[in-house]
Amino acid sequence: MDKLTSRQRAHLRKLAHHLKPIVMVGSDGVTTAVLSSVNEAFNTRELIKVKLQESAPLHVKDAAGELSTGVDGAHAVQTIGRTVVLYRPHPENPEIRLPKADG
């Protein structure tokens, strides 16, 4: 999957609404440890929230870009406040069914 459509992003935003952030980005920014934590989180779930602490040196949109490019197959779904929603389908057994890309 190359890119999420707006319909797919809307579906994922709806599913992510109740989730709590499970990875935190601190004053060091998006480090290899943060990327490793995100990768680890994707081993057990397909949709996660990442929270930027007040001390984080980057803007939330920049962090979303770094996280989605730093983790293979990850897509930034949404940024809201200081929170990023990320999605990566499970390689063998995806649980989340996305709406078709063609409409």
Image: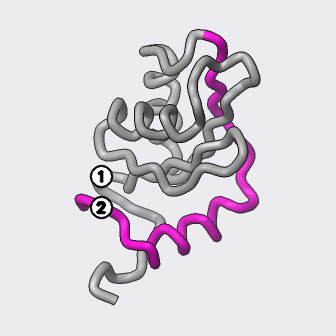
Residue 75 spot, x, y in % from top left: 40, 50
Residue 93's place in the image compared with 79, above or below, is below
Quarter of the figure that contains the C terminus: bottom left
Q: Quadrant of residue 13?
A: bottom right
Front residue of this view, candidates 62 and 69: 62
Q: Quadrant of residue 27?
A: top right
Q: Residue at x 69, y 39 (%)?
A: 82
Front residue of this view, candidates 38 and 28: 28
Q: Residue at x 50, y 48 (%)?
A: 86
Q: Residue at x 29, y 55 (%)?
A: 92
**Classed neighbour count for the residue bearing mark 2: other residues with Cα under 10 Å, few (<14), some (14–19), many (≥20):** few
Quarter of the figure that contains the N terminus: bottom left
- Type of residue at label 1? Pro
Q: Residue at x 75, y 59 (%)?
A: 18
Q: Which residues are magenta?
A: 1-27
Sequence-wise first label, 1 or 2: 2
Question: Real-space Cα distance between discs 1 and 2?
Answer: 16 Å
Foreground mark, 1 or 2, reads 2
Outermost residue on the top side: it is 28
- Residue, disc 2: 3
Front residue of this view, candidates 53 and 93: 53
- Residue, disc 1: 91
Q: Is residue 17 located in the magenta-colored stretch of the structure?
A: yes
Residue 99 spot, x, y in % from top left: 41, 81
Front residue of this view, candidates 83 and 23: 83
**Classed neighbour count for the residue bearing mark 1: other residues with Cα under 10 Å, few (<14), some (14–19), many (≥20):** few
